[in-house]
Image (cartoon, rainbow, N blue to C red):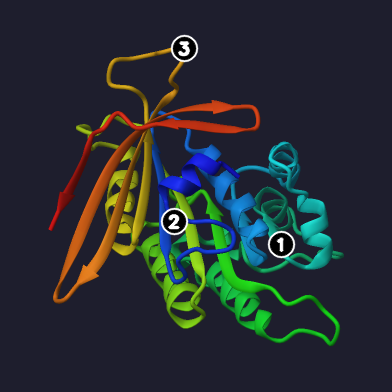
Amino acid sequence: MFAELSSILNASPDSFTQGEFILVSDRQSDASFLIHHFLSFYLRARCRVWFLGLVQSFNHYSAVSQRLGVSLAQAKEKGQLVFLEGLKESLSVLIPQDTNTGSKAMDFLRDPGVGLKSLYEFVRSSVSSSGSRAEGAEEWGPPVLLVDDLSVLLSLGVSVGAVLDFSHYCRATVCSELQGNVVMLARCDGEEEEGDGDDEGSETLLKGLTHQCSLTLHVQGLPTGFCRDIHGQVEVCWRRRQGDGQSTQKKLFQYKVHDKGASFFAPGTSSAVL
């Protein structure tokens, strides 16, 4: 957990906003360190976390979390963490076996055109059943859904509309119905001005997700190019409803990632748009 980032977001494991949809995005950079932050943050906050790891393995996240002082193996053992390992689940769909006991969450791989209903049903049924607990079991805080990352679904043949529908229904279930939080990662590899080929899909996805979320953290490289002491910059954007409209506040921070965390430096550029 990165203390400086928690301070910027005015949040701590003992006090944080519930019902938030947080979008983490990057462009020609790597925002995965923010996913590691939110994973360790919510586990420390004693939330029950559902993690859809569509890109990296459980061992990858476990190794990084260990350096941040959090044991994912213990969290899984206690039932605090439910980790869907997309790479492993994909193999059970693409190479079916008679002894297959995997979930049906990745069934969309057989026909991406049908959308992500199976993946959403996995989320809905898992999160909704978290309210009932066995006698003597630990009591956890609000549910949290983390997804890393939505963009890979586009390369698997899922349409932008289907991905946006999935995020909308997840937000309705987790944020609105259960007053939990959702954190999703989306990537745009191309230049912002370009809009052709696969990048057009990722741009449309990013814009659609931005309209849905209440907090955005967008990571990108420095406009001046490579710097040894600063790895990039993060634009943090808060969106809050005010009466019949919406207020938007943006702040820009530079950052450097260390082995056990990240340092954030505010260059003093911020803006508020009503």
The three-letter code of the residue at mark 1 reads Leu
Q: Residue at x 66, y 58 (%)?
A: 43
- Dot 3 alpha-carbon crowd within 10 angstroms: few under 14, some 14 to 19, many 20 or more: few
Q: Earlier in the sequence, mark 3 or mark 1?
A: 1
Residue 178 location (% of width, % of height): 51, 80
Q: Say which element carries label 1.
A: strand
Per the image, the residue denoted by label 2 is 158
Q: Quadrant of residue 218?
A: top left
Which label belongs to residue 147? none
The three-letter code of the residue at mark 2 reads Val
Q: Earlier in the sequence, mark 2 or mark 1?
A: 1
- Dot 2 alpha-carbon crowd within 10 angstroms: few under 14, some 14 to 19, many 20 or more: many
Per the image, the residue denoted by label 1 is 81
Q: If the image is split into quadrants, where does the N terminus sit? A: top right
Per the image, the residue denoted by label 3 is 228
Q: Say which element carries label 2.
A: loop
Q: Say which element carries label 3.
A: loop
Q: Residue at x 18, y 66 (%)?
A: 246
Residue 102 location (% of width, % of height): 76, 65
